[in-house]
Image: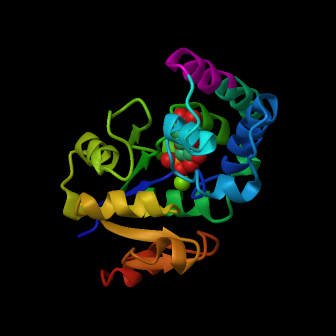
Amino acid sequence: MIQAFIFDLDGVLTDTAEYHYRGWKRLADEEGLPFSREDNEHLRGVPRRESLMLILKGRSYPEEKILEMMERKNNYYLDFIKEISPRDLLPGARELLEEIHASGRKNALGSASKNAPEVIDRLGIRDLFDALSDGHSVERQKPAPDLFLHAAAQLGLSVADCVVVEDAAAGIEAALAGGFRAVGLGPRERVGQAQAVFPSLDGVHLADLLKSLNEE
Ligand code: B16
Ligand code: MG
């Protein structure tokens, strides 16, 4: 029986990708590095350091400079997310979290972002979560399964009891590597490895998720 859902944050519950983009874009412009919206698509679900490495495309910098650039981008990002409010929840997200809770099942967060708790607070959905796992929770990030395993352990549930909801290829890979079932949100080319795929959470109810996973 499915007893819990582990939700990714960026691209699933809200679109912080836009703010990550603006932060990286400002840094890239300051450093004279080419960086487009299309490049940003490859950073979906990718942790901070790995994101910078993708932007640097093999250019080598001293470690000190790398840390400084990561911090600079994060400061820009922190400024942008001050604007986040409950209006920034993606359509269907709150309704689904509430429905899962009301059914006696649990919600957990599994986000690679170190800023995830602040975003959850600003979205006004903290009380709908039974566990939060974020970029501080584990060493090995997605596509390693550690973050989702951390969330399941916090809930006191086994992998078979939990379903991961993700929008990124790296996130689906992480879920499957941990033995979880996954619901993918977005185009099949990106999330087609998941057991069930929806365009987004808009209009998706608990019954739809259970049905898509053959658990009515
Ligand atoms: P931070 P998710 C991910 O969030 C983002 O998709 C990714 O673009 C970002 O680089 C990563 O979090 C780390 O975020 O710099 O705030 O620690 O999709 O796992 O919720
Ligand atoms: Mg994501």
Residue shown at the point (47%, 42%) measured from the top left: 112
Which quadrant of the figure shows ligand 2?
A: bottom right
Q: Is residue 159 left or right of residue 151?
A: left
* Residue nearest the observer in this picture, 188 or 29: 29
Residue 198, x across and y down, in percent: 54, 77
Task: Identify the image quadrant of the C terminus.
Answer: bottom left
Residue 74, x across and y down, in percent: 65, 27
Q: Is residue 6 left or right of residue 64?
A: left
The segment highlighted magenta reads: 62-72
* Residue 56 in the image: above or below residue 97: above
Q: Is residue 63 shown in magenta? A: yes
* Residue 131 in the image: above or below residue 143: above
Residue shown at the point (21%, 45%) measured from the top left: 156
Residue shown at the point (60%, 26%) measured from the top left: 70
Residue shown at the point (45%, 78%) measured from the top left: 192
* Residue nearest the observer in this picture, 214 or 191: 191
Residue 57, x across and y down, in percent: 59, 44
Task: Identify the image quadrant of the N terminus.
Answer: bottom left
Q: Is residue 76 visible?
A: yes
* Residue 150 in the image: above or below residue 27: below
Q: Is residue 194 left or right of residue 66?
A: left
